[in-house]
Image (cartoon, rainbow, N blue to C red):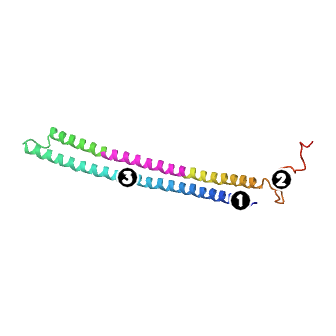
Amino acid sequence: MNPMTAITVGTMAYGAYTSYKGNKNAGKAARSEANAQAFQMEANAIRARRAGVSRAAEVRRETNRLMSDAQAAQAASGFSASDAQAVKQRGDISGVGKYNELAYLYEAEMDARGMISQAGATRATGRNQQKAANTAATNSLISGAVSMFGAYKAGQVGQTPNNAPVVDSQPAWVNPNFT
């Protein structure tokens, strides 16, 4: 093999290897980034649930305060705080308060589930990006091998098995136009 062919084949091998490593590293980075994003989404889901519980507790406290204020107002008015209308009013306040409390919990849970679902999709995307990068890495090795083989074969053209140059021209004494 002549030196230029060896240099060409060596350079192609190095290029194929660096392309392979670059694709592999890109795949790892994509998966790592996706996992980090998914982790953040899951943390946000936990915060959303906690915020929902906190809002629901605030509604519960507010409802209890309203019921207490209603009972005090009813008692101060001179009417019985235990008659049917007074009990109904406090029951209405309690029912609306409980509804709002549960609505906050439900909303927080749905937000959290959406974030967790998105985290799973993000992780799957990262895995798929890594698989695609691994495939590209393998393809770069195969492509590099084919190119190296082509360069090697091209470097062999024009040489005989004992590395003597092949003469493409005819000797001067062979002249087809000689008359």
- Work out whether mark 2 precedes mark 1 in sequence or the reverse, and give the earlier one: 1
Query: Callout 1, which amino acid?
Result: Met
The answer to which of 52 and 166 lies nearer the viewer is: 166
Give percent across and percent down for residue 64: 20, 48
Label disc, if present, on residue 163 of the rendered structure: none
Left or right of 176 on screen, residue 119: left
Q: CA distance from mark 3 to mark 1?
A: 59 Å
Which mark is in front, 3 or 1? 1
Give percent across and percent down for residue 16: 63, 56
Query: Callout 3, which amino acid?
Result: Asn
Which mark is in front, 2 or 3? 2
- Work out whether mark 3 precedes mark 1 in sequence or the reverse, and give the earlier one: 1
Label disc, if present, on residue 167 of the rendered structure: 2
User: What residue do we see at 57% from left, 54% from top?
Assistant: 23
Q: CA distance from mark 2 to mark 1?
A: 20 Å
Which mark is in front, 2 or 1? 2
Give percent across and percent down for residue 107: 34, 44
What's drawn in magenta, residue-wise? 104-129
> Helix or strand or loop: what does disc 1 sit on?
helix
User: What residue do we see at 24% from left, 48% from top?
Assistant: 59
- Work out whether mark 2 precedes mark 3 in sequence or the reverse, and give the earlier one: 3
The answer to which of 103 and 159 lies nearer the viewer is: 159
Quadrant location, the C terminus: top right
How crowded pointer 3 is (Cα within 10 Å; few <14, some 14-19, many 20+) is rated as some
User: What residue do we see at 13% from left, 43% from top?
Assistant: 81
> Helix or strand or loop: what does disc 2 sit on?
loop
Q: CA distance from mark 2 to mark 3?
A: 76 Å
Give percent across and percent down for residue 51: 31, 51
Q: Which residue is mark 3?
A: 44
Label disc, if present, on residue 4 of the rendered structure: 1
